[in-house]
Amino acid sequence: MSPRLLLEVSSLDAWYDRSHIVQGITFEVAQGEIVCLMGRNGAGKTTTLRSIMGLVGKRSGRVVFDGQECLTEPTHTRFHKGLAYVPEERGIVPGLTVRENLALGLTASPLRARTAQRIEEITQNFPRLRERLDQDGMSLSGGEQQMLAIARALMAEPRMLLLDEPSEGIMPILVDEMFELFRSMKAAGTTMLLVEQNVELALSISDRAYILDQGQIVHQGSAAELLADKAIQEKYCSV
C-alpha cells in the first residue's frame, strides 16, 4: 500500500515582479517522508517553499495539502491546517527572550492556552534552549537561533515542516545535533520538505529528492540513488 500523499504541487509557477522564478514544477511529498529540494543558488528552491506557504504574491498552478487546494489561501490558513515554515533568515524577534519567541509560535493557535506546557515539551528536545529560556533570543549563537526558529515552528504541532537552509552559517557540531533531531522527528512521524546546500547531509536523512535548475525540476530519484550519483551532484548542485 502506497503512503498517503500529504503535499501535492502541480504545474506551480511563481514570479517576483517580472522574473519568472519557478516554472511549472510538479512534485509530491508523502506523509512521514523527508523530501529534499536541491540545486544551486537561484534555482528556485526558496521561492518554491515560499509559494507553498503563500508568501509569494504572484503564483499559479496547484498546491494541495492533505487533500485540500490551498494555492490562494492566506498563509495563516495554511499554518492552521498544519504547515509550518522555517525561513533561512530565522526571524528571531529582537528584544524578546527565548521563551517569548517560542510563545509566538502559538499566536492565534488553538494550543495557545497550553503555551507553558508546549514550551516544556518542546525544549525537552532542545536542551540548549531550555538552559537559555530567559535570555534574549538575539544573543544566541547562529546555530542556537536556528534551533529556536525550528522549535518555535514545532510549537503548534505541525503536520509538515518546510525548512530552508537550516545548516547555513552554523558550526558543524550544531549541524550534527540539528540533523539528528530531524531524524528523530521523522521517526516520530513529522513530514519535512528540506532545502539544504549540504548535499550529502541532506540526502543522508531524506527519502527522495528533486533537483531544480533555473526554476524547473531536471532530475528526481531516491536519496540513495542521488547520493551515489556524483555526476548529477556536480552538474546541478556544486557551488
Image (cartoon, rainbow, N blue to C red):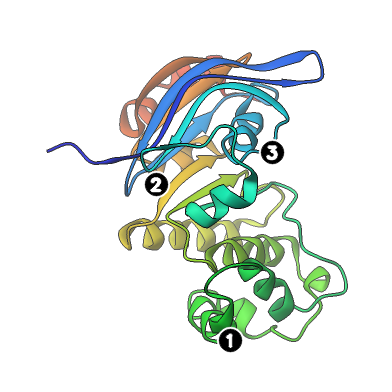
Report the residue marked by disc 1: 116
Tell me residue 188's x, y (percent): 33, 63
Q: Is residue 167 visible?
A: no
Q: Quadrant of residue 175?
A: bottom right
Q: Is residue 155 visible?
A: yes
Query: Are the residues tagged 1 and 2 within 8 Å (C-beta)?
Result: no
Tell me residue 116's x, y (percent): 58, 86
Question: Label for residue 205?
Answer: 2
Q: Quadrant of residue 138?
A: bottom right
Mark 1 residue element? helix
Q: Amino acid at mark 2?
A: Ile
Q: Quadrant of the N terminus?
A: top left
In this picture, residue 192 sits left or right of residue 95: left
Tell me residue 43's x, y (percent): 64, 21
76 versus 74 height, above or below: below
Q: Amino acid at mark 1?
A: Ala
Q: Amino acid at mark 3?
A: Leu
Around disc 3, counting alpha carbons within 10 Å, would you say few (fewer than 14), some (14 to 19), or many (20 or more)?
A: some
In front: label 1 or label 2: 1
Report the residue marked by disc 3: 55
Q: Quadrant of the C terminus?
A: top right
What residue is rendered at 48% in x and 74% in y?
125
